[in-house]
Image (cartoon, rainbow, N blue to C red):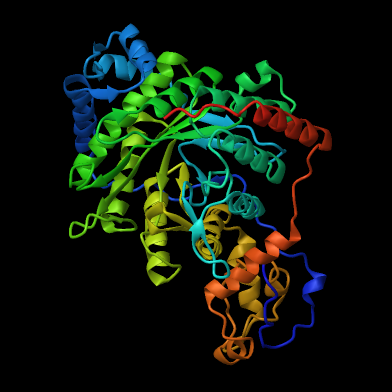
Amino acid sequence: MSEQRPKRRGRRSRTTQQDKPGRAPDYRQLRNPFTPVDLFTADRIEAMHDAALSALEELGIKVLLPEARAIFKAAGARIDEHTEMVYLGRDIVMDAVANAPRSITMRGGAPGRDVLLELGSLVFQPGAGAPHATDLERGRRPGNERDFRELIQLTQHFDVLQMMPPLVEPQDVPTRVRHYATMEAQLTLSDKVPFVFSRGTPQIHESFEMLRDFRGLSDADFHAEPHCYTIINTNSPRTLDIPMAQGLIDFARAKQVSIVTPFTLMGAMAPVTVAGAITLSHAEALAAIALTQLVQPGAPVCYGTFTSNVDMKSGAPAFGTPEHFNASIVAGQMARFLGLPWRCASGSAANINDAQAANETQFGLWGCILAGSTVVIHSAGWLEGGLTVSYEKLITDLEAVQMVAELCVTATGSSDEDIALDALREVQPSGHFFGCAHTMERYTTAFYEPLVADWSNFGTWTENGSKTASERATGIWKGILAADDRPAQDGTRIEALHDYIDQRTADGGAEVVS
């Protein structure tokens, strides 16, 4: 799981490490151990919710897809076809949202890979949607299929990343056949819940077919439970474009998960205040969630937001700021007001994997944790405000993510043995606990084992090459890829998947809707 580490100097124990079982923490199903934090009072949250409903009712939302406008119209919304504006009465919205499930179980490709989405559960994803990849050896480059596959393998390796996102765009693959490459990589290199791009009905349906057949499911089985998800971004302010609206409809009809995520930057495409930006984000999320429930009552859908601010001097996006943190907290209050599972995000505007990148990502991460986020995306690897995923940053950020996971799996209270009165009796004043029975029974499993951190002293660190965290991370990701440890898959299904892709590619692929 990591490169060879220098041995720490110290006193040799009379019991060797080989005599004791090592740590085997389970990061696959996490519960957030922290009580969610409130920033605004309950009456302010209700006022923001009411303002969002007023915005949808009086100001409307622009919906570019005619089919979506027709669905809203059939539910009683007022439509202006000339301007493509939809005016949604609050009763329409809230009656629809009431049908959305409060708990969703997404089925993975192997036992133990299911993902539970509900308030209180905690799911991590690495950075996603970047047009570029970077690492210390190959430099910054447009994302390609090799990068996509390698980053899928790195995500698969770490149990603390429970879902597959689209880490980078494989831009060397034509868009008409790109979904074949991304689905093939996710299905053959991972057994985690896969992501499906919403780029029009033809590509969505073919992605569903590939997943259904690879998992050995019937049509009825596939539609009975969610097996994949997509992310739906609104175009703030108050616009729902064609591929996103079509994705909401297609995923709802297939009973697969849509994670609705308005992307609002305070001072740019949203009001400059936290309350104003979250009110806008809430309105857009409500409209999109309502569409899924008008299509298919009970369709699995997650509330979401990604709200931060811009640098008002340059207009550049900023992440991991106090405003980003506060927006996450308030978004959590809005999600709990509705009772829906929800998605939040960390992130960084830094250009390289440096102290700025770590500070911004970890501050944003803690905003998500204390906000009670169900799904935390961009928790590892994200640089340049989403323009790049860094291999080294993926590894160094995972140190923080795994430490958060440790807080989840160890938050179980204490037993009489944990209180350790026998150890206090055994060790005399001015003594030490290294060799006492209580320590010897637990020392191989007592503490978190670092992924990339180096705890050696300066002399030992210097003797071993004075490697920085990023340099150590390079050795870790290269070791994982060299091991090429893939999940067990049915060879017959892999062959059938490749045959399907070859035939569809020969037919010209599938149209992309923009």
Estimate the x, y position of residue 84 in percent, counting from the top left.
26, 19
Estimate the x, y position of residue 476 in percent, counting from the top left.
64, 67
Which image quadrant is residue 471 in?
A: bottom right
Q: Is residue 430 visible?
A: yes
Estimate the x, y position of residue 75 in percent, counting from the top left.
33, 9
254 left or right of 218 in image: left
- Which quarter of the figure is the C terminus placed in? top left
Q: Is residue 211 visible?
A: no
Q: Total marks drawn?
A: 0
Estimate the x, y position of residue 158 in percent, counting from the top left.
63, 54
445 left or right of 99 in image: right
- State the residue at coordinates (48%, 48%): 128
- State the residue at coordinates (65%, 56%): 25
57 left or right of 427 in image: left
Relative vertical location of residue 382 with respect to residue 32 in this rendering, above or below: below
- Which quarter of the figure is the N terminus placed in? bottom right
- State the residue at coordinates (37%, 64%): 350
Relative vertical location of residue 498 with respect to residue 125 in this rendering, above or below: above
Nearest the viewer among 490 and 21 is 490
Which image quadrant is residue 255 in?
A: top right
- State the residue at coordinates (55%, 89%): 458
Relative vertical location of residue 481 with respect to residue 42 in this rendering, above or below: below
Nearest the viewer among 166 and 257 is 166
Which image quadrant is residue 240 in?
A: top left
Nearest the viewer among 259 and 481 is 481
